[in-house]
Amino acid sequence: MDASKLRANQLIEIELIDENNHDRGALRYPSRIEDIGTEYMSLAAPIHNSILLTIRPGQPIQVTLRVKQFNYMFETRVVSRRANPIPLLIVEKPSKIISVQQKREYVRLPINLPVKYQLLDTKATNPIMQGQTIDISAGGLLFIAADELQQSDRLELEITLTDQEIIRCTAKVIRVSIEEVDRLKRFKLAVGYEDITEAQRDQIFKFIFDKQREWIRKGLIE
């Protein structure tokens, strides 16, 4: 892919590079290309655990992006930072962008969203239940369920991101935990999406990015 194909407002993920052992960071952080110049680009400064990351000039980073369902990657270096009107990283414009095939680790956003779910069972018609998310990512979610399910159970999900954005897909229960609150048991289910489309993943990814920026504007993120 040619660097000239990069566009402003393109959603990306940033990963820090450790030059001492040539290892990559454990996390990728959602970001966006804000502006593209002849030699430099500006990227939205990433957030982790509701805190704006301090990435110093000179730090090498890896940037991952998706174009028409294909993943691409390039490495660059932060040359400076800007705080206004939004926090930005100024980086060197890449000379080379390569196609990659790799499993993605998705950033999780701690947020309470309404979710409906129905146990998929070919032998019975199960009721539609209601729950609430604890966190969400483009790969799955953790939510509070009304009743206990089993690991490997398959569900039909309906996740309400906003009044106009609803994600419908199937998911598989990865982990079940039980906790007691005021002598009442509640069930927490970690699920991974199954038949979700790339467009739906992008929709969730954009929701997470936009929500983080909204929290910055409201002063809810330092």
Image (tube, rainbow, N blue to C red):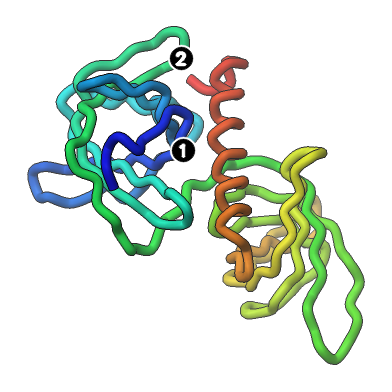
Q: Secondary structure at mark 1?
A: strand
Q: Is residue 67 above or below residue 46?
A: below
Q: Is residue 100 left or right of residue 142?
A: left
Q: Nearer the viewer, mark 2 or mark 1?
A: 1
Q: Is residue 141 above or below residue 214?
A: below
* Res 86 label: 2
Instruction: Specify which label sits upstream in the sequence, 2 or 1.
Output: 1
Q: CA distance from mark 2 to mark 1?
A: 16 Å
Task: Inspect this view and state whether residue 190 appears.
Answer: yes
Q: Secondary structure at mark 2?
A: loop
Q: Which residue lies at the image location 63% right of the left edge and 69% below the top edge?
A: 195
Q: Which residue lies at the image location 64% right of the left edge and 72% below the top edge?
A: 173
| Residue closest to the eye, 50 or 159 | 159
Q: Quadrant of residue 211?
A: top right
Say what amino acid the circle numbered 1 marks. Answer: Leu
Give coordinates of residue 4: x percent, y percent.
Answer: 30, 34
| Residue closest to the eye, 32 or 2 | 2
Say what amino acid the circle numbered 2 marks. Answer: Ile
* Res 11 label: 1
Q: Is residue 44 left or right of residue 119?
A: left
| Residue closest to the eye, 117 or 103 | 103
- Total labels drawn: 2
